[in-house]
Amino acid sequence: MDVSFQVYRGSPSGHVVSGTTTRILGPNEVYIEITHSGICGTDEHFVKSTQVLGHEGIGIIKLLGSNVTTVKVGDRVGFGYVRKVCSACDNCETGWDQYCRSARIYGECDFDVGTFGHGTVWDVSCIFPIPDGYLSEDAAPLLCAGATVWNCLSHFSVRPTERVGILGVGGLGHLAIKIAAEMGCHVVVLSRTDDKKEDAFRYGAGEFHVLDQIDHSSFRPLKHLLLCGSHFLNQASLIRLMDTKGTIYPLTVSLTETPVPFLPLNNRGVRIQGSLVASRQNLRELMEFCNRKKIRPTIMKFPMTPDGIEEAMLKLRKGEIKYRAVLVREPTAVVA
């Protein structure tokens, strides 16, 4: 069965353009009518490509592949960074297929689908039920921003009462504060200015420190530090904040080389831990946790149109989003 749907792509000029994608619905796939999509800083890296943008989607299932039995038409689902867990990928080069066999991911293949659009075709293994009562506009940012911080906090043995540092109060950081606080951690927020101090405390922070004003003689070291800001700092200054055998998680995307000083790292036994988005099981747990604890992202909404997308991405570029942008389809365009 062929399905066609409107999508929004990047372009060499940096403008968002509309187009049409046609897919044959595979036996293990579903066609989803998109109602909401979060905007991520990662989308900025692809805005001058010609691929369909977006990887924080919420929508309604409209068609099922012949083998699909785990969901039904009308279900509200989320879909994000991982598009398909597959056994092989014809688009992968020799030597890369070992990685791609674990997950077909945004930015490496399937350039004609994403979450910026009116619909998409997705493998049923990589969609997630949205809990009843949890708003779609709130669920969208969990598919990447929420998943990124949740993976650190749930997968790397972060314990309640431990001192967890969050550097940067933005799209990632504000969710990290809310989630870590609800997990019972003592959240220590670090920022370049005190502009967001009030928000940090309202979201659950136990301490707030301006980076260049920290009194190291009284500062209690951190067991975990999530780097959620876009401003990359001298690594030695961060290691100084860490407890013995503490862990630093660099979560923001940058192509800038970041030198790591080995001596202070070794002296404290500090680990730098890479972390991508959460696994499928972790994402399901995140949805349930946020619904149970009533955790909601702080969002700004924009229409899912080329102009709406460009406005949102311009504000994101200027640092004017507080704290996560969400695209919303016009009500008249959404089939319930």
Image (cartoon, helix red, strand yellow):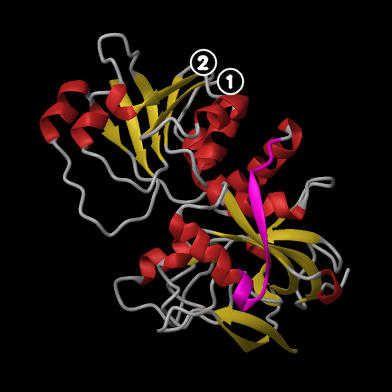
Q: x%, y% of residue 199?
A: 57, 32
| Magenta stretch bounds | 295-308
Question: Which of disc 2 and disc 1 is earlier in sequence?
Answer: 2
Secondary structure of the residue carrying tag 1 is loop
Looking at the image, is 238 positioned above or below residue 232?
above
Q: From where the camera sits, is residue 22 visible?
A: yes
Residue for point 51% across, 52% down: 320
Q: Residue furthest left?
A: 263
In the displayed structure, does residue 10 sit left or right of residue 6? Answer: left
Looking at the image, is 36 positioned above or below residue 114?
above
10 Å neighbourhood of mark 1: few (<14), some, or many (≥20)? some
Secondary structure of the residue carrying tag 2 is loop
Query: Looking at the rendering, which quadrant does residue 75 occupy?
Result: bottom right
Which of 209/69 is in front? 209
Q: Confirm whether the magenta stretch covers residue 299.
A: yes
Residue for point 72% across, 54% down: 137
In the displayed structure, does residue 9 sit left or right of residue 60? Answer: left
Q: x%, y% of residue 141?
A: 61, 52
Q: Amino acid at mark 2?
A: Thr
Looking at the image, is 191 positioned above or below residue 323?
above
Which of 246/299 is in front? 299
Which residue is labeled 2 in the image? 161
10 Å neighbourhood of mark 2: few (<14), some, or many (≥20)? few
Residue for point 88% across, 68% down: 336
Looking at the image, is 41 positioned above or below residue 231?
below
Which disc is residue 184 wearing?
A: 1
Q: x%, y% of residue 166?
A: 44, 32
Are discs 1 and 2 less than 8 Å apart at CB? yes
Which of 265/318 is in front? 318
Q: Amino acid at mark 1?
A: Gly
Which quarter shows the N terminus?
A: bottom right
Q: From where the camera sits, is residue 84 visible?
A: no
